[in-house]
Image: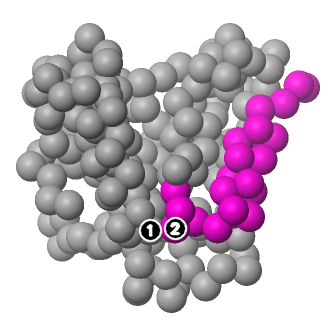
Amino acid sequence: MNFEHRKYVCNIRSSKEEIGKDVGIYCWWFKDNCVEALLKRISKDVDWKRLAGESLQHKNFNNVKYTALYVGIAAGQKKGILERFKWHIEQKHTVSNVTKGYLSTLRRTLSALMNFRLLKSSTEINCIAQEKLNKFMDENCVLEWNYYPKKSKKYLETIEDGIINSGYYPLNIQSNRQVTKDLRKKMSEMRKTICSAP
């Protein structure tokens, strides 16, 4: 899929006024130099280099190679894409967000893959994890997106499903037929175990 808009995460964090409020579909791209390390944390038994060549989606941004690992939709929110980006990029790792499971799935997944521990009773530990994750995103991630004004959530989910199942997006778990059941289960377990009591 071709996306019309692109921004480095660090630039979105510093200039959100340039992001529109329509609903839409977005894709997270990660610098290649960190992709294999992230994916190896999911499973050491998968030949990620083969997948990187055959199934993962790649692009060059300013002569740096990136790999697409996650696709999402922004639907039903009052501020569409802008609200979804703020949720993924700026969400606080408060004890309440960690305990009640309110953290963005992507933030929880990346915290698990990078072994940034989240505790159900420690604001200090969670803030450290939050800062490390924000730094990682700022240094390694690019977001691309398309707006779909006035389109329903169901419409966006149909497009998202087509994107996810036409390539290989290993950080997408729900409705992802390209990732094996075992890997989906492992990712789900990793997300749960990253949040623990002290």
- Say which residue appears at 71% left-offset and 70% top-offset: 43
Residue 33 falls left or right of residue 2: right
User: Disc 2 vs disc 1: which is toward the camera?
Assistant: 2
The image position of residue 23, as x and y in percent, is 22, 27
**Tag 2 and tag 1, C-beta contact below 8 Å:** yes
- Quadrant assignment for the C terminus: top right
Task: For label 1, count other residues whose C-alpha is less than 10 Å away and answer few (under 14), some (14-19) or many (20+).
Answer: many
Work out whether residue 42 or residue 31 is closer to the camera in this orientation and state it: 42
Residue 85 image offset from top left, x and y in percent: 33, 30
Residue 119: % across, % down: 79, 26
**Which residue is drawn at the image coordinates 76% and 38% (left, top)?**
192
Q: Identify whether 21 is placed above or below 35.
A: above
Q: Does residue 31 appear in the picture of this structure?
A: no
Amino acid at the residue labelled 2 = Gln
Question: Residue 78: x and y, percent?
Answer: 26, 11
Q: Helix, strand or loop at disc 2?
A: loop
Among the two numbered marks 2 and 1 on one chain, the one whose residue lies closer to the N terminus: 1
- Who's the residue at 40% across and 58% down the image? 164
**Residue at the right extreme, as displayed:** 198
Residue wearing tag 1: 168
Q: Quadrant of the N terminus?
A: bottom left
Classify mark 2: residues with Cα within 10 Å, few (<14), some (14-19) or many (20+): some
Left or right: 136, with 154 as reference point: right
Q: Residue at x 28, y 38 (%)?
A: 156
The residue type indicated by label 1 comes to: Tyr
Which one is nearer the viewer's eye here, 189 or 39? 189
Q: Is residue 102 left or right of residue 119?
A: left
> Disc 2 designates what residue?
178
Q: Is residue 122 depicted above or below 61 in this figure?
A: above
> What range of the chain is rendered magenta?
176-198
Q: Quadrant of residue 140?
A: bottom left
